[in-house]
Image (spheres, helix red, strand yellow):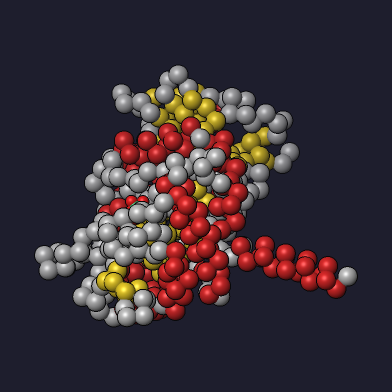
Amino acid sequence: MLLKTVLLLALVAQVLVLENGLLRKPPMGWLAWERFRCNTDCNEDPKNCISERLFMEMADRLAQDGWRELGYEYLNIDDCWIGGRDAKGNLVPDPKRFPNGMAFLADYAHSLGLKLGIYADMGNFTCMGYPGTTLDKVVQDAQTFAKWKVDMLKLDGCFSTPEERAEGYPKMAAALNATGRPIAFSCSWPAYEGGLPPKVNYTLLVDICNLWRNYDDIQDSWSSVLSILDWFVTHQDILQPVAGPGHWNDPDMLLIGNFGLSFEQARAQMALWTVLAAPLFMSTDLRTISAQNMDILQNPLMIKINQDPLGIQGRRILKEKSYIEVYMRPLASEASAIVFFSRRTDMPYPYRTSLARLNFTSSKVYECCAPPCRPRTSTRVTSSVASGIKPTSH
Ligand code: GLA
């Protein structure tokens, strides 16, 4: 009997080890990569190179310009920070660009009520050729990140074999847990295996990762947003059910504030990423962002929907011949978020629909909670709008 109890406890412990309790809602914050890439030339471009200064300035903006209060709390470093390994094999940041080290940056972020994310690569090198985390270094690197008080790790997958990744990602999940520090784990693993079963085991990912990149890198263009959206929608039957509190699909960063999207396209990305329950990682220069783009990223309704406690990923529910698409995400308190998304390239299009067509078939009376909803759910679609629909008790 005692043996049985011990065995049972051991099993329970094993299951608990995999659940770190983090990211019950999609993470929000700022990630350097899409906007600042691997700019390491601090002599020519001291304001924009990957350096302590850049991250401290973004931290200041996150804390002072209303972002943090809205939930944008992660300040995430991407590739090109590594200087090498010391005599003991510990990762060290580039000493010129991060003269005070990573523990200093983590302290700085924490002093402002923010969290620090860092980047490593399961393989021989990072995607930009910096030292990688080979299998023998997984535990050591996890301990280094915990010692620095890092709060999230993005583990990329360049320069490794599928076999090394299959061993390395679960190993890193266990190593992070073993540090005792809560460190959210962002896995690029599925993106390196084509993003789909049978090569990708989403059941396993749910257990070991808090979020994962499924598909290609986003680039600063509308065509890139559409190609990612298309891939997610094509495979929504596989992807939608695996997302939930603590484990999210990641269609990659928000481009809003950069150079490739029009105003309407920026609104559309925000609305679509919101219903997809996507992580909201901005990657833009918060020092110079326009008021208009700030309004999109700080839209309280979008954030509320994105952060809905049920954590159900939305789906495309309609694709009309008119090139209007409808996306729906179920929310807490029997509410739903609807995005009317136009792929038209001619002009604003008057789209009329009905509750029945949107699958709201109960005899309840529905209340439309947000503009630009109009009576009888007749909605003029310009590019994309999101609205809440909620049954009222009668
Ligand atoms: C890969 C990742 C990107 C970024 C770069 C950095 O391409 O998918 O998100 O981290 O590497 O080199």
Residue at the limit of the structure toward the top, as seen here: 321
In which quadrant will I find the N terminus?
bottom right
338 or 168, nearer to the observer: 168
Left or right placement of residue 60 versus residue 179 in this view: left
Residue at x-position 28% and y-position 41%: 221
Q: Is residue 329 above or below residue 350?
A: below
Percent of width and height locating residue 181: 53, 74
Q: Is residue 112 above or below residue 169?
A: below
Percent of width and height locating residue 97: 23, 72
Residue at x-position 45% and y-position 56%: 164
279 or 9, nearer to the observer: 9
Residue at x-position 56% and y-position 58%: 208
Percent of width and height locating residue 258: 26, 49
Would you identify the image quadrant in which residue 128 lies?
A: bottom left
The number of discs equals 0
Percent of width and height locating residue 244: 59, 51
Residue at the limit of the structure toward the right, as seen here: 1
Instruction: Examine the rendering and report whether any part of residue 34 can be seen.
Output: yes
Instruction: Examine the rendering and report whether any part of residue 284 can be seen.
Output: no
Residue at the limit of the structure toward the left, as seen here: 44
Left or right placement of residue 315 versus residue 333 in this view: left
Would you identify the image quadrant in which residue 144 lies?
A: bottom left
